[in-house]
Image (cartoon, rainbow, N blue to C red):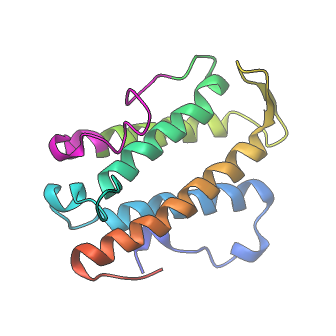
Amino acid sequence: MNPDRAIPDDMYQLGERELLTTMLDNHRATLMWKCAGLTDDQLRLRAVEPATLSLIGLVRHLTGVEEGWLAEWDGREPTVIYEGYDASFNDVDSADVAAGLAAWRAKVDESRRIVAARTLADVLRYSDGSEVTMRYVLAHLIEEYARHNGHADLLRQRIDGATGE
């Protein structure tokens, strides 16, 4: 198992906040594990025609997901990172992989800072009028990563046959 994905010995006894943030960090580490050791071209490889799904596309998408769900908690409007519908998956043939990975890492660090400054019960009214708790945001991010890590697992298996939870 990847050491960044290690499950704490007391996982079943963690408090709610620690459980949610540990599970989210585990999913983040899983995404990086699926990308580890691959070339830029392999990270750009699409699943099957006509799908635009690729590992770097998933990384870019999840960068936008972190921004979209947490920017307003930081008192600012979300920045559009990739312009247009499914933009994070488009144009990956010439994508700067190192820049995409660095942007994701920076966004995750920023997200951790934003989450640490809030309680799970804090409520935010988004610019669209919806109200959500930080608890919901963390649960939603876990769901996003879990779904896309399933995609990443299939992509990785297609690239080099590697599998694993």
Q: Nearer the viewer, residue 44 or 29?
A: 44
Q: In which quarter of the image is the N terminus?
A: bottom left
Residue 46: which quarter of the image? Answer: bottom left
Q: Secondary structure of the magenta portion, mostly?
A: loop
Q: Which of 76 and 148 is in front in this view?
A: 148
Left or right position of 128 against 48: right
Q: Residue at x 62, y 63 (%)?
A: 23
Left or right position of 77 against 129: left
Task: Pick out the residue farthest to the front.
Answer: 50
Residue 7: which quarter of the image? Answer: bottom right
Task: Judge whether residue 26 is colored magenta.
Answer: no
What is the x, y in percent for residue 51? Answer: 35, 56
Q: Give the range drawn in magenta.
A: 79-100
What is the x, y in percent for residue 52? Answer: 33, 52
The total number of labels drawn is: 0
Q: Which residue is drawn at 30% across and 65% down?
A: 48
What is the x, y in percent for residue 107? Answer: 45, 37
What is the x, y in percent for residue 93? Answer: 17, 46
Residue 98: which quarter of the image? Answer: top left
Q: Residue at x 61, y 33 (%)?
A: 70
